[in-house]
Image (cartoon, rainbow, N blue to C red):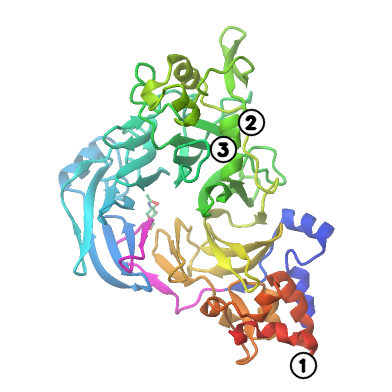
Amino acid sequence: MSPLSALGVFCGLFLPLSLSEYNTHNCIPRKSVLYQDNMKLFREEGICNYSTMLVREDLGLLLLGAREAVYALDINDISIKKSWVYWRVTKEKQMECTYKGKHAEIECRNYIRTLHKVGDGRMYVCGTNAFSPTCDYMTYSEGQLRLEEAQEEGKGKCPFDPFQRYSSIMVGNDLYSATSINFLGSEPVVLRSSSSALRTEFKSSWLNEPNFVYMDLVPESNNNPEGDDDKVYLFFSENAMEYDFYNKLMVSRVARVCKGDMGGQRTLQRKWTSFLKARLDCSLPESSLPSIVQDVFLLKNDDWGKSVFYAVFTPQSSLSDMSAVCAYSVSAIGDVFNKGKFKTPVTVETSHVKWVMYSGEVPTPRPGACINNAARALGMERSLDLPDKTLQFIRDRPLMDEAVRPLTGGPLLVKKGAMFTRLVVDNVLALDGERYAVMFIGTENGYVQKAVNYAGEMIIIEEIQLYQTPEAIRTLRLSSSTGQLYAGSDFGAVQMPLSDCGRYELCLDCVLGRDPYCGWDLSTGICSAVASSSSDTDCEARELHLSPWEQHQAAVPSCLQPGSGTLALLRATAAC
Ligand SMILES: *[C@@H]1O[C@H](CO)[C@@H](O)[C@H](O)[C@H]1NC(C)=O
């Protein structure tokens, strides 16, 4: 095989027309890296379900929550266990749980599901505790991990059911969580546990059998001309209420609440006055049903409006095996919530309710808006000051009419085969001085797909097999400072470097790989990491503003004919 025939399988190397067609229908990894014995792995005999992670770069630790145990692992080598605590269910709790009809060894155990850093540097940890969720504080000092044994009620903060998806985030000392608040799992809530605790209404128009996947904070009060508030965004799927469909139809949603929300005075007392939700659009080829969001990652930008949510979607129907990634800008989501129309229920044929666009008058202040300059100008300093009209409107109409569309109009990436489960995104500075969003996508068979977007063109740089046997990746975390990715599954946790440029042995391979972490070093004749020299701005390629794409185009001839004029471009890393 000639080196160039490899191009044939290189998704996205073709020119615009054929490229976009090929690209949107199926992206194929350029390189496939099989399982390697030297992979840094952590697992302990008798312990399973390594599904919760907290990266503490400040402590040099990866905290790993599993079934009835929390481990403090060395962030640089997770096979090194520095300390650990066991948190087992008591015999009484386990019995109580089995009396209620749950399985003793499966459901009636303590699955650690929540691990957050709190304001004072301690950690907050919650477990399902045999269908009786419980939380505690945890410290790490003098090399010792310790539970404070000051157990708190975990209802609404952590699921009862270990199999239920859920999400939470700690903002200062306030825990925002989205889960079921009862044993049966029939009462979903989005809850803020703080001195002024708030929750969602128990109404199917607010949450309808939801499956919560992700939450994050966007600091929208920074440099905000409207004097707006910080917001917590939530991603989930739920049963649609806005479609007439013969069957249950699921849709993906984004919702948000304002950090400063204090609830209403009479209407919506101790409930969110700012809970708004919209459908998330990400259409998959070969499927007419809405796709289902499985995981999300917020790629933060100093300018919060330019921050982007990357989301993984899978089909609703088991007939398709296409997964996709769609991206949404914070500002586009904001436009739908801040300027869009609402949906409203109307009763047709006596009992049947249909949701249609609301075209009547919208009260002032705008329903669902945070307290901003406009509200303050009307003398409303807190959500408690909002008029009943605004509150009643939002209580009955939390859904926006318009869906949030992806940044690029459609999916960034589509792939057939093993379903995508989780993703994280790294912001990488390449030799051209540009930043690229590199996505690491976990699959249900234990692979990570590493993909990057070059000006609208998506390529999968490589796929890496992390587990010897097919294991669903249940959690992914990234540490940019150590350059490591951590994956958790039922079986164990695995660590991999964000890049392994040494895998590319030949110049052509290295450059064709188009991995923004890597560059060919002419002085040593090695494909090496760009980051190690990225502090120096004298790089030739950077001066010439070559993107990894142009660099590759310029480099192909120089790899083939050493000594040609373009060779100097490859000196980029060597020059630093
Ligand atoms: C825990 O792991 C076992 C396999 O090791 C799996 O069968 C089970 O479904 C997992 N439980 C949860 C709650 O994920």
Q: Residues within 10 Å of mark 2 (few under 14, many from 20)?
A: some
Q: Image check: 405 left or right of 60?
A: right
Is residue 158 visible from the viewing direction of this image? no
**Of the residues shown, which amino acid type is indicated by label 1?**
Gly
Q: Which mark is residue 402?
A: 2
- The first of marks 3 and 2 along the sequence is 3
Q: Which of marks 3 and 1 is nearer the N terminus?
A: 3
Residue at 69% across, 49% down: 408
- Residue 343 sits above or below residue 92 on the image: above
The answer to whether mark 3 and mark 2 are in CB contact below 8 A is no
Q: Position of residue 138 (x, y in %)?
A: 22, 55
Q: As rendered, which of 302 and 517 lies closer to the eye?
A: 302
**Image quadrant assignment for residue 159:** top left
User: What is the x, y in percent for residue 172?
Assistant: 32, 47
Q: Mark 3: which secondary structure?
A: helix
Q: Which of marks 2 and 1 is nearer the N terminus?
A: 2
Kind of residue at disc 2: Glu
- Amino acid marked by disc 3: Gly
Q: How far apart are marks 3 and 1 (CA)?
A: 53 Å
Q: Decide if residue 376 is on the left or right side of residue 569.
A: left
Was residue 111 drawn as part of the magenta stretch in this picture?
no
* Part of the protein shown in magenta: 34-61
Q: Nearer the viewer, mark 2 or mark 1?
A: 1
Q: Residue at x 71, y 60 (%)?
A: 455
Q: Please name the residue that numbered disc 1 is placed on.
A: 563
Q: Which residue in the protein does label 3 denote?
A: 334
Mark 2 falls on what kind of element?
A: loop
Q: CB at mark 2 closer than 8 A to ligand 1? A: no
The residue furthest top is: 350
Specify whether tag 1 is near ligand 1 (CB below 8 Å): no
How far is mark 3 from mark 2, CA to CA?
12 Å
Q: Distance between the residues labelled 2 and 1?
A: 57 Å
